[in-house]
Image (spheres, grey):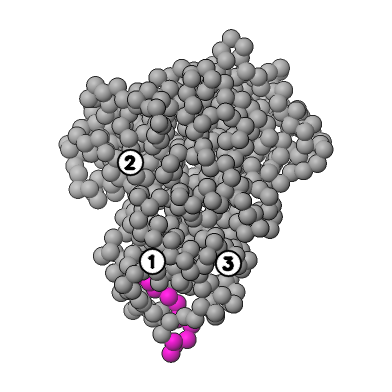
Amino acid sequence: MLVLGIHDGKDPSVVLMRDGAVERIGFEADYVDDPFEISGFPSRATEHLMAIEGLGGEEIDVIAFAGQHLPEPRTRRELLKQFAESGTFRGSAKKLLRTAVPFTSRKPSRRERLRYLEKLGLKSDRSTFIDHHLAQAAVAAASTHSKDGRLLVLCCEGSGDGMAASVHVSRGGRLDRVATVSDDNSLGSFLETMTYLLGMVPERDEGLLMELGAMARGPQLSKVTKRLSILFEFDPLLPLNWRRAGNMPETYDCVEFLRVHMRRRRFDHIAGATRRFLEQFLGQWIDRCALKTACESVVLTGSVFGVRSLYPTLSQCTRTTQLSICPVPNDAGNAIGAAILALAEKKGVEHVLPMGQPWLGEDAGEGDCAEFVRKEESRGGVWVDQPEHPEVRAAELIAGGALLGRITGRVDMSRLGLGNRSLLCRGDLPELRAASQQLLRPDVFWHEIPTLLLSSELEAEFYGTEKMPPGSIGEYWLRPRRPQVWTGRMNPDAAVPVQVTSEGADPSTAALVKEFRKAAGRTPLLCTPWLNRRGQLVRTVQDARESWRSQGLDGVIAGPFIIMRRADPDATKPKHAELARRAFYGGL
């Protein structure tokens, strides 16, 4: 049976499930110039997926849409305009007009959503609609395992089908919803508003705000945190729910209220207080839910928990025995959840099947890499090697001071790179760390660069890993045991981002990590997601070919091949000492 899962909201995606196994995922953001402006039906991603798999519309048995209802589609400019008008007469008039006058809302109807299927040759009568939060909970439950088969799934985000948060219990894979929080009490919308008030872009820079908040210090920080903590309270009659307190308006329309509430407060104190409040409040919510449901294994999902820098404090302040984050906590993974639940609905099965490994995106096979090498050789200025043990040779070059891009295998569904689409370099050289940061986020000086580790290495290098499930995969923020080595210069005592993979899930990347340890000792292996000129993850060898020279990389690991920039026309290979000494801005 073939099931097509579709998420047609923010960051749209499409997934193909064949006979109960998720096989391929596609993201519409890969086909646009500005990935932050995209929202709606993933038409190009769906068309490409169908072409790659050689499928026709008649062959798809079920089409599952994630979300019963969709919010109004907004570009980034429209989103900022909405925040700017919040609380003003113009904004209030627009809100009243949408509420009181029919047919003025831009929310897509089901008929409009199904219309895209007909353009692609798909059968609209084979479609079904899955609740937004149920889809997110299904992805989290399918990607996480607990010892006793009981799992508590907590979702916290901006809004989805009228809900901002939900609590699900998975028993042997069967999902039961036990609590919901309405979207007018949304912590996700609250965080977006605080991001806007501090001059950042909502729905994009919340993670950066939390990283900046971790640096805040001073006696006023506690006072500002208390001013935020009085805005929300837990419902005494519904212990798993929270609500707004006092005279706070709906969180999706509270810009002016929070502006007045935070008047004359310092920027760093507001950022730090926002982080502290979320850590304290969400920690209490996790404990209350775990206590009332008698579940000790918890998995977190939703856009708020997608801010992974909250994890260290949440793991310490909660009494759960296992606490993990869904590999795709944001909306893009909803297509997977919709497909999983649609299959269960079609087959009459009451439980969620395990999802398996997360590498479901575009593939870069050996044939594609060989074509990449041939074209680069024809351009000149490079030397090419196909060593017997490519991981050993690549590890030697990285340990010697090279900044390399790596493209091999498939893209992971969370688009973190996880070594398969990453820039790799050693982490103890300041010039390499700075070069990686410039390529990832040149506009953010405090942003930390992720490191790549095997799940078996975590306990020896980081605190608080005992609550992570065995064989964890994805990105976590953890506190290092040797902060002088693992962190940058901005905040040496803070947690750092770590991309975690495992030997069983990705043997080639695990082999590279092990060989790097042999060559460089306990030096961190920086693993920056490899982005192209449009700010998207490099997904194909064509993307890599267009990017690596202009970005000043020393070379590319393309499957079994290693391509290095030729510094000296007469040289046969780069010297490690030369690589380690020279600056890494702009390459040669």
Q: Nearer the viewer, mark 2 or mark 3?
A: 2
Residue hosting label 1: 391
Q: Nearer the viewer, mark 3 or mark 1?
A: 1
**Quarter where residue 542 is shown:** bottom left
One can see residue 10 in this view: no
Q: Amino acid at mark 3?
A: Leu
Instruction: Kindly state the secondary structure of the residue where label 3 is placed.
Output: helix
Residue hosting label 3: 432
Residue 220 located left or right of residue 442: right
The picture places residue 18, in percent across and down from the top left corner, at 23, 39
Above or below 297: residue 330:
below
Residue 128 located left or right of residue 497: left
Q: Which of marks 1 and 3 precedes in the sequence?
A: 1
Asked whether the beta carbons under mark 2 and mark 3 sit within 8 Å of each other, the answer is no
Q: Which residues are magenta?
A: 561-571
Instruction: Kindly state the secondary structure of the residue where label 1 is placed.
Output: helix
